[in-house]
Image (cartoon, helix red, strand yellow):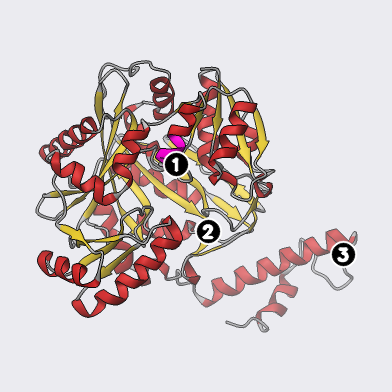
Amino acid sequence: MKRVLIANRGEISVRISRTLHELELESVAVYTAEDRLALHTRSADRAIELRSPRGYLDADQLIEVARAAGCDALHPGYGFLSENAEFAAACLTAGLRFIGPPPSAIAAMGSKQRARARMAASGVPLIPGGDARTLFEASTTALRVGYPVLVKATDGGGGKGMRLVQSETELASALERTRSEAKSAFGSDAVYIEKAIENARHVEIQVLGDQHGRLVSLFERDCSIQRRHQKVVEETPCPVLSPETLAKMAEVSLRGAAAIGYFSAGTFEFLLAPDGSFYFLEMNTRLQVEHPITELVTGLDLVKEMVLIADGRPLSFDQVTRRGAAIEVRLYAEDPATGFLPSPGKISLLRPASGPGVRDDSGIFQGALVGSNYDPLLSKLSVWGEDRSQALSRMRRALGEYAIGGIRTNLAFLARVLSHPDFATGNYDTGFIEENLAELLAQPKIDADTRWLLAAAAAAAARVLDDAKAGARAADGPSVSEPSAWLRAQRSSLKW
């Protein structure tokens, strides 16, 4: 392997480029017209424009570009075509190593219903559920497993195509809306019913395997802090998982991976009930967004391992141990105050957090334009500590240091999540954000004197800048040394 095409964009493309450079492999990035000046195009040895209207989803063009650039391998990152079995097979047919699992394993886990059947045959515990091809069948399944239930897209993922149904009266509407959303997002309107496990945590097991039959577990990640089924904060270890339950989760994950001939990086996702029982949700046959915290506690480079595995080499380590604790938060270009709507624009200021134990996986830079055509994820901020207490303190400090201007982000929202007493004690589940949303969105209270001072200072700074741009200070403007009279004049005009 000498040259690798990265069939992705943003922070994950940058992150893959870095490992390829360390392995002394050439990296080729791809970009659409909107991403021409993006950071990932500068991080690779070479960048090639995708001219297809389908951009990063055009499998044929990606393979054509890879072959034209002389690549002998392709890394799909996450999202886009990373879990498309046909794309993986097409890469192999074109003579490209696919840096991921075999197409057969992707196909086996691609449909949630097929995955459930496959895992059940391997003895992996499943959430009670069943088919929902018609309203009658959905109603029969829901009554059998008991309300509340989830209506879920069979080919879904990423929190899309999923609705909670509390009673029979809500079922028909939820079924129709989920089918419509599934058809739009995944090209299939197939759905199924699953029992909703109340007050559960979302815990996943990272697995890694080579083509020589060796499969290992790299411990767990707790991904329970979610908004609309989309992960926001992840940590490892899980604050409430016992060693015995972890061992059982790891054992069934490895058994499930072996049953489909799996190799490369993959993740088994489970719901952990308050009584300690756990149930299989799905398997992600790719690199996870939250993989940095596993790397921080194990010292491994999962992208490096994926590359070596695709090259036919065995895992590079004999044993793996976990040291300390790690937390990751996802920084999005979105405005929590407007229902988390995307916030595109130009980044006018960027000051990432740094210091001991801090890692920033970013796809942005000061002056970058954030568009609205792609996922609004800007950066993944991760920290490591000797224990959870130190990791939590470091994350709070890092969030306080991180500064970004020109666009609205969820930075302050994340800081409030990390400062919440229930998160501090580890007493949370997948309903944490929904249950505490009003509190997490509340703006900090500022007394009247502080408010007018802040506003007056901002107005004074803006006026000084305007004078500097004009080349001369206005005759009645404030001087830098004596602004008090002008500031006092502003106080009476401030409206709150």
Q: Residue at x 33, y 19 (%)?
A: 315
Name the amino acid type tagged 3. Answer: Arg
Total of numbered circles in the picture? Answer: 3
- Residue shown at the point (45%, 62%) measured from the top left: 184
* Residue of label 2: 409
- Real-space CA distance between mark 3 and mark 2, rounded to the nearest whole angstrom: 35 Å
Q: Which disc, if any, is residue 78?
A: 1
Q: If the image is split into quadrants, where does the C terminus sit?
A: bottom right
Name the amino acid, label 1.
Answer: Tyr
Of tags 2 and 1, the one toward the viewer is 1
The answer to whether residue 187 is magenta is no
Residue 356 in which image quadrant: top left
Mark pair 2, 1: CA separation: 22 Å
Give the crowd class for mark 2: few <14, some 14-19, many >=20 residues within 10 Å. Answer: many
Displayed quadrant of residue 477: bottom right
Crowding around mark 1 (Cα neighbors within 10 Å: few <14, some 14 to 19, many 20+) is some
Helix, strand or loop under label 3: loop
Sequence-earlier tag: 1 or 3? 1
Q: Which residue is mark 3?
A: 473
Magenta residues span: 84-88
- From the image, give the main secondary structure of the stretch colored magenta: helix
Q: How far across and how far down the image is residue 37, in percent?
A: 69, 43
Determine the secondary structure under disc 2: loop
Task: State the image coordinates of residue 63 (x, y, percent, origin top left).
Answer: 56, 33
Say what secondary structure mark 1 lies in. Answer: loop
For residue 362, say whether it is visible.
no
Q: Residue visible at 29% across and 55% down?
A: 423
Mark toward the viewer: 1 or 3: 1
Residue closest to the eye, 320 or 82: 82
Classify residue 19 as left or right of residue 231.
Answer: right
Q: Is residue 303 visible?
A: yes
Amino acid under label 2?
A: Thr
